[in-house]
Image: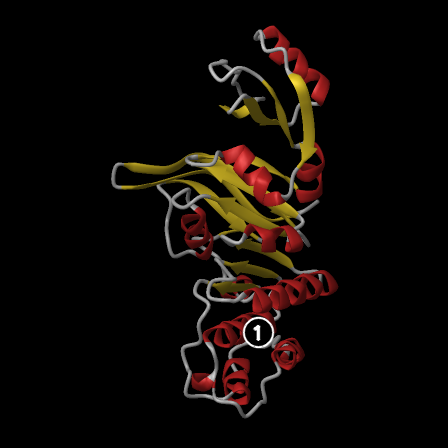
Amino acid sequence: MESVIECRHLTHRYGRRTIYEDLSFDVPQGRILGLLGKNGTGKTTTINILSGYLEPQAGECRIFGENIRTMSPLTRRRIGLLIEGHVQYQFMTIRQIERFYAAFYPAWNRDAYYALMEKLQVAPGQRIARMSCGQRSQVALGLILAQNADLLVLDDFSMGLDPGYRRLFVDYLRDFARAEGKTVFLTSHIIQDMERLIDDCIIMDYGRILVQMPVDELLRTFRRYTFRCADDAVLPSDGDLRHPSVLRGRGELCSFLPPEEVRLRLARAGIPGDDFTSETLNLEDAFIGLTGKY
């Protein structure tokens, strides 16, 4: 599958603090990919590098085959970027701001904008300044979609939205992107929204990528295991057995390994593994299982 975004060997630091080193990933064409990570792992840094606002100390990013540092204006037109979910010209009405933005984008899709405004149940003559924070954020998102870009880059797109507006936009964006064949690269702190929306995920830890894979594959293969053990038991911990812990006589760990392999490794470590259970996880629990609770 052709890649719309190609990042190779990225390294970036703020002063002496290394955000990441030798980071590489691809974003396939026509997929919705979510970048997940705890605060400070480099999500917004990555968005800023992709948008050209920030130059990494090392490495290279290409979008549609062009280096982002020397990208042509025609290629930049193919990218819709949302850094902050607000609208600058709040004195305008819904209709006025649509007409204003349309003048700058030759491929403008006003239907995508007004379809979202209809779902918000706002009138074209309504002034943006009199809308709620969540509604104004939706207007900003509608203006991004109407640009009719081939690639949408959305940083923390659900910021400021209540559960109802988040669900509305997640469903609208998912259906719009798939119907129009768009590629979407986004971040959000609301992982429940991401599970409903994205095809693929990258889960970052401090300085590295832990996994990049389709969400359905992650949820099918990554499991949480619990078992009875002594409170002072020393559980095995390696790259395959993630974040083992013991609380009140119950051991817990997460792994991509099948149950029989986990039981074998526990036995080798002298852990009987009585009352052994295995369960699949939702995306938020899988994220915590990979990155740890703290």
> x, y percentage for residue 92?
45, 88
Q: Nearer the viewer, residue 174 or 277?
A: 277
Q: Is residue 37 left or right of residue 64?
A: left
- Residue at 45 percent across and 86 percent down: it is 130
Element under label 1? helix
- Residue at 50 percent across and 61 percent down: it is 72
- Residue at 50 percent across and 84 percent down: it is 97
Q: Nearer the viewer, residue 2 or 91?
A: 91
Q: Is residue 61 above or below residue 103?
A: above
Quarter of the figure with residue 217: top right
- Residue at 62 percent across and 62 percent down: it is 170
Mark 1 burial class by Cα count in 10 Å: few <14, some 14-19, many 20+: many
Residue identified by numbered label 1 = 142
Instruction: Say what amino acid the circle numbered 1 marks.
Output: Gly
Residue 210 in view in this figure: no
> x, y percentage for residue 16?
26, 36
